[in-house]
Amino acid sequence: MTGLRLEDGKNKSVSEILDVTIIGGSIAGLAVAFALTNAGHRVTVFEATDGKNKFERCGAFKLPPNGTLCLNRWGLKTLLDKYSHKFMKYTFYRCEDDALIGTLLLNGLLQHEAFSGQDVADYIFHESSDVWDWLYKLAVDSGVSFRPNSRVVSIDTAKSTITLHNGDEVVSDFIVGADGVNGIARSVVSGQTPDLGGNRFLTVTCTLPCDELLQDKDLATLVDDAYWVVWGGDGVQLQGQVGKRERTYIVTFGYKIPDDVVLDPSLEIFGWYDTFKLGDFKFIDYKKFHGRALKLVNLVKEASQTYSNIHVEQPVLEDLVCDDGRVVLVGDAAHGMIPGQQHNAALGFEDAGVLECLFSSVQSRHNISRLLMAYDEIRGPRIAFGVKIDLSLRDSIMLPKGPLRDQFDDFLRTSAKEHVPAQSDTDDDHLSRLWNDTLKMWLYDASEQVEDWWTKWGNLGTMRELLEHETRRTTIYIDRDISRQ
Ligand SMILES: Cc1cc2nc3c(=O)[nH]c(=O)nc-3n(C[C@H](O)[C@H](O)[C@H](O)COP(=O)(O)OP(=O)(O)OC[C@H]3O[C@@H](n4cnc5c(N)ncnc54)[C@H](O)[C@@H]3O)c2cc1C
């Protein structure tokens, strides 16, 4: 396979080769497995399912520049250039009348002065199934041991041990929880089961043949490779993009479930189902859609294969590492966001990048807890920020009619007209802030973050550790409140 960098980046300079357990072999688990093997460690991934690619029929993800940069650094640029679309245009419509609000020239925006002199990658759109395959190959070729049909049923944080469904126990130096938002690791680290009392969202993804759209003169206008189309409305969002292979059109339907709807208790929250059709969700109000948005929704209704998920909004976690310092969360297990946002996958890639940099220079097992606390220091604020930005954008897209929504639409309209984000006179304008924060999200370099952390805290941490590690293995050397500001 072209474009894969396998052995060349492997770090041979670590003095201590660690054994790492990863729970979950999906996108984030595979990325971390590869990254830590690349850093010189022995990694085993335990995956509950048969370990086959489950993304075959279920859509794609957007990858903002910060996510693309991680994959480029792992040697996937050639493949991404070949098989992904660069988003050139982001076009936003309102659902109820199919009215155009504006088109942002997305990769054009990356020429913004905020990016000058930075290593900025493309904003791309990519089939999840390909990325899973590439990450799996990277991981396995670099020496990761992948154990399918291995459900983890418990974690002993003090002993850094997992127990599998068949009773086998596995001890390792530390454990990475990449088992998703409803996984065992998130509960162990947070000390809580998922909160099921928050806002509920239905996501349905579907892959349609482009030919189906081309048969309708209105929908045919959507079949444009560089085009990311989003319709927003009161509690709804609909996204569409052309897939790269076999001329497909990928649709993601998002719907806020009304508070008074009682769901079938047999539905597992956070699970992905291929057994439901859009029409099975009787609470959907189709009057919210009009024109091409409605036509597209009708195609999804008739599609033979859809993937559905019900997600309850989760609070941001206070800590990503458990108190014993040997279990760490990555990917969806760490951020817990609803599917279909900008940064679902990208945050997981950043997590992997930071772990790779931190563990590239581990000198002793005694350093593990401190390095994991460094991860918490670096990733905690970043993940909280990313979740805030994505939710803020989603809420603006899903606003009901009213002055707030008019403000958002005006901002987008002006930005589209001027080909740059609209300028605001006041510093506290929340839309300008949202844009500036989006730029901050797009600019993230894991290795720089780790370097900054070492510059700020490394020496202090090392000195204190030399003094204290023998007696207080899991001491937290850094005042966590300070760096979370
Ligand atoms: C089938 C599927 C379809 C998806 N479709 C979309 C989509 O269309 N749009 C979108 O935006 N997002 C989608 N997502 C979510 C999105 O892909 C995630 O953001 C991305 O996969 C990164 O997630 P992750 O690797 O952190 O966790 P996940 O992808 O949720 O993977 C968690 C992994 O952990 C494994 N696991 C869970 N518990 C255990 C355990 N106890 N022991 C061992 N293994 C365990 C699971 O089997 C799974 O492989 C989908 C996810 C899945 C699983």
Image (cartoon, helix red, strand yellow):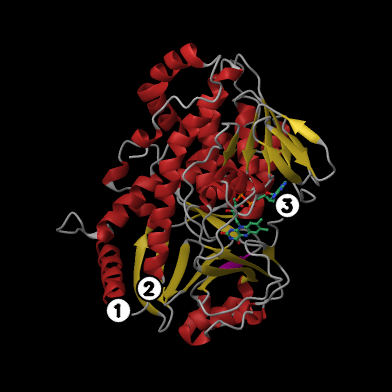
Q: Position of residue 68 (x, y in %)?
A: 50, 44
339 relative to 156, above or below? below
Which callout, 1 or 3, points at the residue further toward the start of the chain? 3
Q: Is 284 positioned to the left or the right of 485 in the image?
A: right
Amino acid type at image mark 1: Gly
Other residues around mark 1 within 10 Å, as few (<14) / some (14–19) / many (≥20): few
Contact (CB < 8 A) between labels 2 and 3?
A: no
Report if the CB atoms under discs 2 and 1 are less than 8 Å apart. yes
Vertical order, 145 against 219 (above or below): above
Q: Amino acid at mark 2?
A: Leu
- Horizontal and vertical percent for residue 299? 61, 79
> Label 2 neighbourhood size at 10 Å, few (<14), some (14-19), many (20+)?
some
**Mark-to-mark CA distance, 2 and 3:** 36 Å
Ligand 1 under 8 Å from disc 3 Cβ: no
Q: CA distance from mark 1 to mark 3?
A: 44 Å
* Magenta region: 247-251
